Amino acid sequence: MQAKRWGRIINISSIIAFIGTDHEAHYGASKAAVVGLTKSLALELAPYNITVNAIAPGLIDTDMTAGATPEEEKKRSLELIPLGRIGQPTDIAYAAVFLASDRASFITGQTLNVNGGEAMF
């Protein structure tokens, strides 16, 4: 990317980086670190026309959440999502396609929160 003087890096963080969670401090810390890494790399790579951004999903309907998230917790989470639904993997994919496109060429060092409005910051 540096040699070509163009590129897109898209990291995956989590809503947990911003709101935390109980009994999973290691997960929240690692996802917060992804946000910091994104900002630092964005500064470092900007002279090469390489953008670096992150996506922070909220609750997404995946194998990971299906097996690890009890139904009671999903119901409670759903009440906190203003759009009233659990996200789909395509919601994250569309965000990544946007960040990889030329339409996002002036966006770097940012975290795109894809969470149905669960955490507005």
Image (spheres, rainbow, N blue to C red):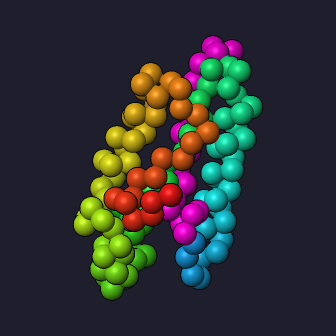
Q: Quadrant of the N terminus?
A: top right
| Residue 99 is covered by the magenta coloring | no
What x and y, as percent, mark residue 46? 67, 26
Question: Which residue appears at 33% of the width and 67% of the height?
Answer: 81
Q: Is residue 99 left or right of residue 46?
A: left
Foreground residue among 91 and 110? 110
Q: Outermost residue toward the left?
A: 84
Residue 74 visible in this rendered orientation of the protein: no
Q: Quadrant of residue 63?
A: bottom left
Magenta region, residue range? 1-19
Q: Position of residue 40 (x, y in %)?
A: 72, 41
Looking at the image, which residue is at 66% across and 71% down?
26
- Residue 42 picture quarter: top right
Q: Pick out the residue farthest to the top.
A: 4
Pick the front one: 28 or 106? 106
> Residue 4 lies in magenta, yes or no?
yes
The answer to whether residue 2 is above or below residue 114 is: above
> Could you say where residue 56 lies in the image, as x and y percent from the top left?
49, 54
The residue drawn where x is 71% and y is 33% is 43
* Residue at 69%, 50% in the rendered image: 36
Q: Is residue 77 visible?
A: yes
Residue farthest to the front? Answer: 121
> How many numbered dots are placed on residues in this image?
0
